[in-house]
């Protein structure tokens, strides 16, 4: 009974001996068959030539490692026509020819490798009495036969980033079975076309609107219906609106015009591919200078935008919350006035200006005190330059009733405008789902720019058509948008027109790449676990198998 349990419930083996040592149990096993089949001619043979033993690692018992010692008989092949004179008997259900581990142990080690990868897998296997090297774990995983044998009927195609968006691969998902069918190492027409040709019978392919994929499907599966993925359609619309907002920055100013209690989020639209690239971090000072410059630049653009649209100086000042004098100064400048053009100031002092301004705003107007403070911070310029700066500040800021209040120079800094990436969500969301203050911001945006209102209406109509699969509206919508000539939206509409059949299918068929995102996230997780050390082949097998 125990023997059978240990030896696959097979009655073709017998247990001859059990030796327990400190960490290892050795099971001596031999065959009870009287004959064996010649691997060359398939004839049965009975004459034993010799005996030898081979060992194979097996599944553990309790905390003991297990070693099978198989007594192997070598037989004579008595078939005169056979070229094989002798052969060793085989135990195919227990252990593969030449293998050093039983099939069932290999299966366990492979399963661990599939979810943990080579090094981490080997570490776990050591602690559960199935020790092996990381390389062996990887080899076992690679031995899994490629599983892309069944051809899906409905295929979803998307790309995934190898590393921070520098190189892309392709993921193929069976949208009916909800599983990854295959992973391709690149995002190219040729690779995709070749894969599709090798898997005939696909009826529907959902994909983004990258030209590589469109052409790849045309070449590899010309009969398949192409569906433009709805998520990517929304994404493309959002991108067009972001460009539009960036061209009309007054809207972004208007959105932020009313002070809100909450900080302005910098959240980009929820794209699964969005990965923030943090380049070398600027110092605090650089950051502050950069922010100040950006704020001024944005304000400058808002002023010139509004001015070009014929808005009066007084209205601009009110909308942007700045003085009329400032508006006039910017307009007179004839270009964006850079801060550092004031040659009067010593360059050594420049680096300490943010600190001085901060102290000034806090109420410290004493030249000597300020001079000493920046000396502590490494200032090696003269005291008179500090005094000159203080004098200038005094002139600009006549004494006020409350000395603690911020100096006017700082007060002049207006509310930060919203980023286009953030503001675009006001345009995309269903208006009835907007919170009151967001709705108010949206209304302010729409009032400021004459092109935004029609663009907003077009966008909302498009989103409604997609949501409700109102395919009848597509062609009239495309024509109307192109005729309206808002460049960003017209460009979007033209690109849809070039891909008309697929966009039309997106509005009339239920298929979409929604679930692919989940598979891409799982892929990212596996990729991260592998620390980029294992190659594409292993990544592919792990993504398909897990
Ligand atoms: Zn033979």
Image (cartoon, grey):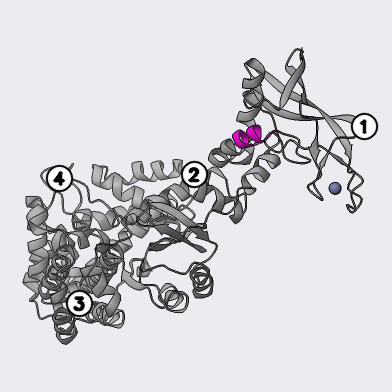
The dominant secondary structure in magenta is helix
Residue 99 visible in the displayed image: yes
- From the top left corner, tell me how far across and down residue 284 is, in percent: 41, 49
For the point 81% across and 44% down, the residue is: 38
The answer to the question of whether label 1 and label 3 lie on touching residues, with beta carbons closer than 8 A, is: no
Read off the residue under disc 1.
50
Give the alpha-carbon distance from disc 4 to disc 3, as whole Å.
31 Å
The earlier-in-sequence mark between 4 and 1 is 1
Quarter of the image for residue 511 reads bottom left
The answer to the question of whether label 4 and label 3 lie on touching residues, with beta carbons closer than 8 A, is: no
Q: Residue 39 vs residue 148: left or right? A: right
- From the top left corner, tell me how far across and down residue 363 is, in percent: 23, 42
The earlier-in-sequence mark between 4 and 3 is 4
Read off the residue under disc 2.
546
Quarter of the image for residue 439 reads bottom left
Q: Residues within 10 Å of mark 2 (few under 14, many from 20)?
A: few
Decide whether residue 145 is among the magenta residues. Answer: no
Of the two numbered discs 1 and 3 in the rendering, the one whose residue sits closer to the viewer: 1
Q: Is mark 3 within 8 Å of ligand 1?
A: no
Residue 207 visible in the displayed image: no
Question: Along the line of sight, which residue is nearer the eye, 87 or 431?
Answer: 87
Give the alpha-carbon distance from disc 2 to disc 4, as whole Å.
46 Å
The answer to the question of whether label 2 and label 3 lie on touching residues, with beta carbons closer than 8 A, is: no
The earlier-in-sequence mark between 1 and 2 is 1
Numbered tag placed on residue 261 in the rendering: 4
Give the alpha-carbon distance from disc 1 to disc 2, as whole Å.
45 Å
Q: Residue 540 vs residue 382: left or right? A: right
Give the alpha-carbon distance from disc 4 to disc 1, as whole Å.
89 Å
Of the two numbered discs 2 and 4 in the rendering, the one whose residue sits closer to the viewer: 2
**Magenta-colored span:** 102-109
Q: Residues within 10 Å of mark 1 (few under 14, many from 20)?
A: few
């Amino acid at each position: 009974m125990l023997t059978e349990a240990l030896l696959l419930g097979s009655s073709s083996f017998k247990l001859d001996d059990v030796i327990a040592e400190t960490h290892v149990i050795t099971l001596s096993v031999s065959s009870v068959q009287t004959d064996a089949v010649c691997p060359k001619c398939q004839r049965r043979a009975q004459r034993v030539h010799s005996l030898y033993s081979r060992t194979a690692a097996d599944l553990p018992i309790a905390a003991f490692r297990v070693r099978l010692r198989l007594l192997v008989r070598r037989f004579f092949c008595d078939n005169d026509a056979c070229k094989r004179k002798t052969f060793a008997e085989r135990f195919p259900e227990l252990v593969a020819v030449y293998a050093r581990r039983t099939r069932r142990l290999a299966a366990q080690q492979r399963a661990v490798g599939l979810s943990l990868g080579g090094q981490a897998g080997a570490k776990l296997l050591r602690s559960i009495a199935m020790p092996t090297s990381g390389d062996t774990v990887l080899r076992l995983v690679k031995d899994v036969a490629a599983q892309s044998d069944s051809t899906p009927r409905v295929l979803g195609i998307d790309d995934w980033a190898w590393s921070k968006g520098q190189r892309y691969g392709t993921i193929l998902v069976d949208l009916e079975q909800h599983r990854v069918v295959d992973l391709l190492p690149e995002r190219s027409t040729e690779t995709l076309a070749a894969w599709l040709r090798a898997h005939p019978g696909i009826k529907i392919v959902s994909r983004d609107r990258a030209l590589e994929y469109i052409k790849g499907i045309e070449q590899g599966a010309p009969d398949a219906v192409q569906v433009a993925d709805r998520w990517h359609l929304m994404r493309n619309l959002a991108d067009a609106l972001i460009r539009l907002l960036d061209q009309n920055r007054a809207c972004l100013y208007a959105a932020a015009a009313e002070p809100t209690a909450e900080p302005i989020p910098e959240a980009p639209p929820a794209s699964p591919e969005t990965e923030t690239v943090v380049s070398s971090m600027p110092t605090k000072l650089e950051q502050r200078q950069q922010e100040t410059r950006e704020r001024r630049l944005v304000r400058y653009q808002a002023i010139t935008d509004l001015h070009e649209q014929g808005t009066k100086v007084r209205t601009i000042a009110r909308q942007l919350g700045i003085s009329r004098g400032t508006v006039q100064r910017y307009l007179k400048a004839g270009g964006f006035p850079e801060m550092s053009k004031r040659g009067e100031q010593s360059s050594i002092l420049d680096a300490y200006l943010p600190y001085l301004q901060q102290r000034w705003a806090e109420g410290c107007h004493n030249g000597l005190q300020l001079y000493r403070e920046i000396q502590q911070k490494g200032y090696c310029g003269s005291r008179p330059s500090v005094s000159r700066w203080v004098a200038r500040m005094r002139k600009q800021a006549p004494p006020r009733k409350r000395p603690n209040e911020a100096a006017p120079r700082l007060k002049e800094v207006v509310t930060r405008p919203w980023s286009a990436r953030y503001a675009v969500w006001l345009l995309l969301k269903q208006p009835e789902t907007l919170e009151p203050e967001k709705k108010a911001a949206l209304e302010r945006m729409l009032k400021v720019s004459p092109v935004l209102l029609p663009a907003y209406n077009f966008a909302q109509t498009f989103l409604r058509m997609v949501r409700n699969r109102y395919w009848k509206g597509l062609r009239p919508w495309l024509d109307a948008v192109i005729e309206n000539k808002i460049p960003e939206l017209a460009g979007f509409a033209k690109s849809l027109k070039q891909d008309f059949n697929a966009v039309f299918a997106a509005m009339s068929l239920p298929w979409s790449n929604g679930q692919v995102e989940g598979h891409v996230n799982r892929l990212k997780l596996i990729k991260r676990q592998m620390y980029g050390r294992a190659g594409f082949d292993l990544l592919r097998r792990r993504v398909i198998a897990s």
